[in-house]
Amino acid sequence: MAESSLLNELVNALKCLPGVGARTAQRMAFHLLEHDREKGLILADSMRNAIEKIGHCQKCRTLTEHKICKICSDKGRNPETLCVIENPSDVLAVEQATAYRGYYFVLMGKLSPLDGIGPEDLGLDLLEQRLRKEPITELILATNPTVEGEVTAHYISELAAKHNVKTTRIAHGVPVGGELDYVDSSTLSHAFEGRRSY
């Protein structure tokens, strides 16, 4: 692209988004500059505001602009169930597709020795503290059904067993190799209702 360096800078910045290659980033940049500069400024302000002010919940580790997220602050939820998921986007997927009313713990990834991601990288020490201190009777494993997700679920089930906490796994129906935030609501709801002991 033999255009101005500011245009190249914008295109390269847009390429950091998942699924956005050079051509798509170029189309987005031209659209913003040619047709929607005002909305582009709103987008830039929103991105800066979110990046500066959104962090992780101190209890469940999901994304929030508060110390404790809205779900963890909700006293009307069931304190005996804790759903372990990989990413903050999975919290939204479960909340939108199911009638689950317990709490969450977000791993922010999955065990992957090849990538150097071990238990300490997933905050499993924090999860163990919750199992020890809270009245949790069921730990629902809702990691993605990938090889790494299954290994992570197995490791966490052994951790829960040390604290005499029943472990269940969401039912299959979610395709192997799939990601929770890409699964339709009906499939995710059935998988959640049909969870089994792990």
Image (cartoon, rainbow, N blue to C red):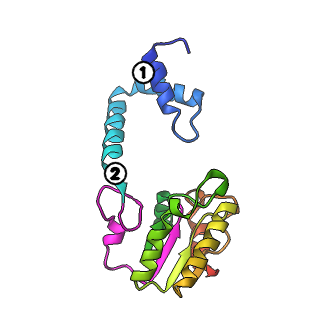
What residue is shown at x 33% (from left), y 39% (from top)?
A: 48
Q: How many marks?
A: 2
Helix, strand or loop at label 2? It is loop
Q: Of label 1 and label 2, which has the lower sequence position?
A: 1
In the picture, residue 151 is in which quadrant?
bottom right
Q: Nearer the viewer, residue 116 or 33?
A: 116
Q: Which residues are magenta?
A: 57-86
Image coordinates for residue 58, horizontal then vertical, percent: 35, 64
Point out which mark residue 34 bears. 1
Distance from disc 1 to disc 2, alpha carbons, whole Å, reads 31 Å
Q: Is residue 22 above or below residue 135?
A: above
Helix, strand or loop at label 1? It is helix
What residue is shown at x 38% (from left), y 28% (from top)?
A: 36
Q: Nearer the viewer, residue 47 or 84?
A: 84
Point out which mark residue 54 bears. 2
As shown in the figure, which amino acid type bears the numbered disc 2? Ile
Q: Nearer the viewer, residue 167 or 184?
A: 167
As shown in the figure, which amino acid type bears the numbered disc 1? Glu
Image coordinates for residue 119, horizontal then vertical, percent: 55, 64
Query: In front of the other: label 1 or label 2?
Result: 2
Decide whether residue 155 is among the magenta residues. Answer: no
Can residue 101 be seen here? The reply is: no
In the picture, residue 32 is in which quadrant?
top left
Q: Residues within 10 Å of mark 2 (few under 14, many from 20)?
A: some
What residue is shown at x 63% (from left), y 51% (from top)?
A: 115
Q: Is residue 38 above or below residue 137?
A: above
Can residue 44 be seen here? The reply is: yes
What residue is shown at x 35% (from left), y 71% (from top)?
A: 72
Dominant secondary structure of the residues highlighted in magenta in the image: loop
> Quick check: 93 left or right of 65?
right
